Amino acid sequence: MSDHLYKVIELVGSSPDGIEAAIQSAIGGASKSLYNLRWFEVLETRGHIEDGRVAHYQVRLKVGFRIGAADGSGGDFVELGAAPFNEGP
């Protein structure tokens, strides 16, 4: 088995549709700018109440992604987990 190197970040996802949807929101958003996402851990769950009902769910996650060549070949261990952000309209 070859050695692997991972980076861990924290994300917060939210959704009015439940905890699972909030997790999917965080992972889906992160996957647009990060490569090699491998695992997540829910650290905290909370919500917003309106008129005596749950109106919104929020989760805080740890997410791990593999650092290395974007093609999965291992290559040199250059951090390719984070893609450049486009700051346009």
Image (cartoon, rainbow, N blue to C red):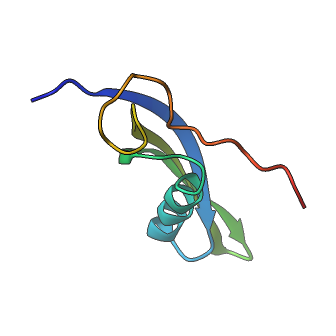
Rendering coords of residue 6 (x, y %): 37, 29
Identify which residue is drawn at 30% across, 32% down: 74
83 in relation to 53, above or below:
above
Identify which residue is drawn at 57% across, 38% down: 82
Rendering coords of residue 22 (x, y %): 54, 64
Indicate the quadrant where residue 8 lies. Answer: top left
Q: Is residue 17 left or right of residue 56?
A: left
Q: Residue furthest right?
A: 89
Rendering coords of residue 38 (x, y %): 34, 46
Q: In the image shown, does 16 or 25 lie closer to the viewer? A: 25
- Numbered disc total: 0
Identify which residue is drawn at 52% across, 55% down: 31
32 in relation to 64, above or below:
below
Q: Is residue 12 left or right of residue 61?
A: right
Q: Residue furthest left?
A: 1
31 in relation to 67, above or below:
below
Q: In the image shown, does 52 or 32 lie closer to the viewer? A: 32
Rendering coords of residue 64 (x, y %): 40, 38
